[in-house]
Amino acid sequence: MAPAGHVDGVVNVPGDKSISHRALILGALARGRTYIGNASPAADVLATAACLRACGVWVRDFPPARYALDGNGVGRFSAPDTVLDCANSGTTMRLLAGVLAGNDFEAILDGDESLRRRPMLRVGDPLRAMGADVEASPDGTPPLRVHGRQVLNGVTWRSPVASAQVKSAILLAALSGDGPTTVIEPLPTRDHTERMLRMCGVGVDSDGPVVTVHPGPVEPFGLRVPGDLSSAAFFLALAASRPGWRVRCPGVGLNPGRTGILTVLEAMDAQVLVDEGAPAGGVEPMGDVEVRGTRLHGITIAGELTVRCIDELPIIAVLASQADGDTEIRDAGELRNKESDRIAMLETGLRLLGVTCESTADSVTVHGPVRLRAAHLDAAGDHRFAMAWAIAAALVPAGAGASVIDGADAAAVSYPGFFPDLAALIAS
Ligand code: S3P
């Protein structure tokens, strides 16, 4: 990866990964035909589609981004005759565990080396309270064996972690409940599942961190998925880093649970222009986003804001190295449970780039501004680092050399076209 000279352009990022997973899953739970457009091409989303097919759902893909599905209704999956391979995708494993809890057969969910290190009792515990039989490895990691029941107990579950995957697993299982189910989170997380359940005619009440689902049938739908703001974040951060640089990403999702990156860029002093359009499917906010770079300053990110930009924290930490003063990212212990230990990854990688930073169990502090030096970096199988390190490499001053990123192909987990799109932006 070579340094960027000047950045000014438009990037059309692919469809949102979180919404695409949910569109496929809800289409599979609906009775009748669902159409999905602009679906994410992420390897994670392909894993969800493959698992649904293995459970007897007719899923037809029309590459690059369209799907048609015929769902059979809630509780009407067929027993898979193979292990369900969730690959690198925590969303696939946790959301499908919730769906399988409402089906009376045994299924085994497994994944790659990274997913096999991630905590699953956070979904196993509530699903067991609802009446499903769920078993993980002794240390609470995959593989996950789920033997569900046609009718589950409606429960009130106080989740110890702010996790949309955990909340969604419970809300999907709640469709098979004998009464309403309520989830209470420590802080509110992205609410795609709630919005999309409403789009499908399901009764959902929500008030901040408290959400209740009333069991009922799921109606089929047509949805054009908004662009993925988490993918756009890499280009928007690049634009923010230098006065005079600019990037526009049209048609991206603006779910308030995801727009923390825009709040952060603005707080750091970047110019953020948002032109909101009609919501996708009538429920998911979306619009065009443009970011213009300025002299940035360090900020503190904590609490609800940390949750609202949880996936963007690696690229935010890279950007913080270009800001005047310190940036402190707090309340971020969940970063240690992602596709890699993202706090440890940041410390190692940022130091190789010449950045001074330190961490605690749940925080990272980055001291800026730094003239980055070219480095030999490792994505370590984590897609967000394949892309965050690429942006860091682009921020190394011209003439200071090219960086090498081992395992950069991990970007395909969420954004297979990232490197061509970055190259086109830098060349434009
Ligand atoms: C996601 C929720 C978040 C996020 C992940 C996608 C989702 O995970 O980090 O990339 O689609 O629900 P957690 O629920 O573990 O916080």
Image: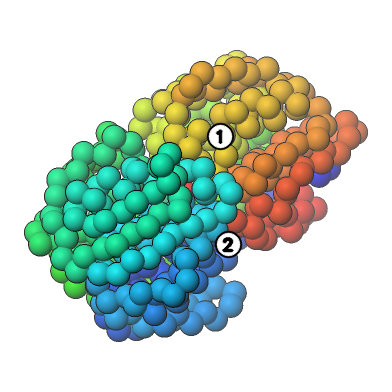
Closer to the chain start, of discs 1 and 2, is 2
| Picture coordinates of residue 392, whole percent (x, y) | 72, 36
Of badges 1 and 2, nearer the viewer stands: 1
> Based on the displayed image, in which of its 4 quarters is residue 55 positioned?
bottom left
Please name the residue shown 27% across and 45% down the image: 125
| Picture coordinates of residue 87, whole percent (x, y) | 55, 58
Residue under label 2: 43
Q: Residues within 10 Å of mark 2 (few under 14, many from 20)?
A: many
Which residue is the extreme one toward the left? 179
Q: Label 2 near label 1: C-beta < 8 Å? A: no
Q: Secondary structure at mark 1?
A: loop
Where is the N terminus found, in terms of image quarters? Answer: top right
Using the image, determine if residue 76 lies above or below residue 423.
below
Q: Camera-side residue: 6 or 151?
A: 151
Q: How is the image coloured?
A: rainbow
Residue under label 1: 341
**In the picture provided, is 71 more to the left or to the right than 425?**
left
Which residue is the extreme one toward the front? 138
How many numbered circles are shown? Answer: 2
Between the C-alphas of marks 1 and 2, the distance is 20 Å
Residue type highlighted by circle 1 = Asp
Instruction: Name the mark on residue 125.
Output: none
Within 8 Å of ligand 1, the CB of disc 1?
no
Residue type highlighted by circle 2 = Ala
**In the picture provided, is 278 more to the left or to the right than 363?**
left
**In the picture provided, is 160 more to the left or to the right than 367?**
left
Q: Residues within 10 Å of mark 1 (few under 14, many from 20)?
A: some
Q: Secondary structure at mark 2?
A: helix
Residue 260 visible at all: no
Where is the C terminus found, in terms of image quarters? Answer: bottom right
Using the image, determine if residue 280 lies above or below residue 341.
below
| Picture coordinates of residue 261, whole percent (x, y) | 49, 39
